[in-house]
Amino acid sequence: MDKLSYNLYTPKLTHTEMSTTKQSTVKALDSLPVAIGFLIAVLVFTMFVVGYDQGQLFSVVEGQSAYDTMWIHELTHDMRHAAGFPCH
């Protein structure tokens, strides 16, 4: 190719354009307590669901029949035994 076609694809940056770039920093330590609190809340909720739920969560929707069917208990039954929770 000739020199003209080469110049068409070469970006021309001036000193002014390059000096307008700004850097922003994110402080990771500011959000650390919030992240740890969220993870602890998820852990506590999960421990309740896996270890202790006997129909309480679905009783809000299904009523008394949720205590008879115990859907979550049946779905997490083997995981309960693996984690050491007694259920019967």
Image (cartoon, rainbow, N blue to C red):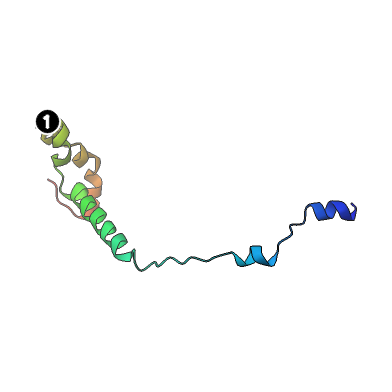
Amino acid type of the residue that numbered disc 1 sits on in the rendered structure: Ser
Task: Indicate the secondary structure of the residue bearing disc 1.
Answer: helix
Q: In the depicted view, which residue is nearer to us: 49 or 69?
A: 49
Residue 41: x %, y % from top left: 23, 55
Q: Is residue 31 visible to the viewer in this orientation of the structure?
A: yes
Q: Classify residue 16 by image quadrant.
A: bottom right
Q: Is residue 81 visible to the viewer in this orientation of the structure?
A: no
Q: In the depicted view, which residue is nearer to us: 79 or 70?
A: 70
Quadrant (top left/top right/bottom left/bottom right) for the C terminus: top left
- In the rendered image, which residue does mark 1 sit on? 65
Residue 37: x %, y % from top left: 26, 60
- In the image, taking residue 32 as reference, residue 26 lies left or right, namely right
Say which residue appears at 29% left-offset and 65% top-offset: 33
Say which residue appears at 77% left-offset and 56% top-offset: 10
Say which residue appears at 34% left-offset and 66% top-offset: 30
Q: In the depicted view, which residue is nearer to us: 64 or 74?
A: 64
Say which residue appears at 14% left-offset and 36% top-offset: 60
- In the image, taking residue 27 as reference, residue 84 lies left or right, namely left
Q: In the depicted view, which residue is nearer to us: 54 or 18?
A: 18
Q: Judge the density around disc 1: few (<14), some (14-19), many (≥20) Cα neighbours within 10 Å.
A: few
Residue 43: x %, y % from top left: 25, 55
| Depicted 18 relative to depicted 59: above or below | below
Outermost residue toward the left in this view: 64
| Depicted 2 relative to depicted 29: above or below | above
Outermost residue toward the right in this view: 2
Q: Classify residue 20 by image quadrant.
A: bottom right
- In the image, taking residue 76 as reference, residue 5 lies left or right, namely right
| Depicted 47 relative to depicted 67: above or below | below
Residue 23: x %, y % from top left: 52, 66
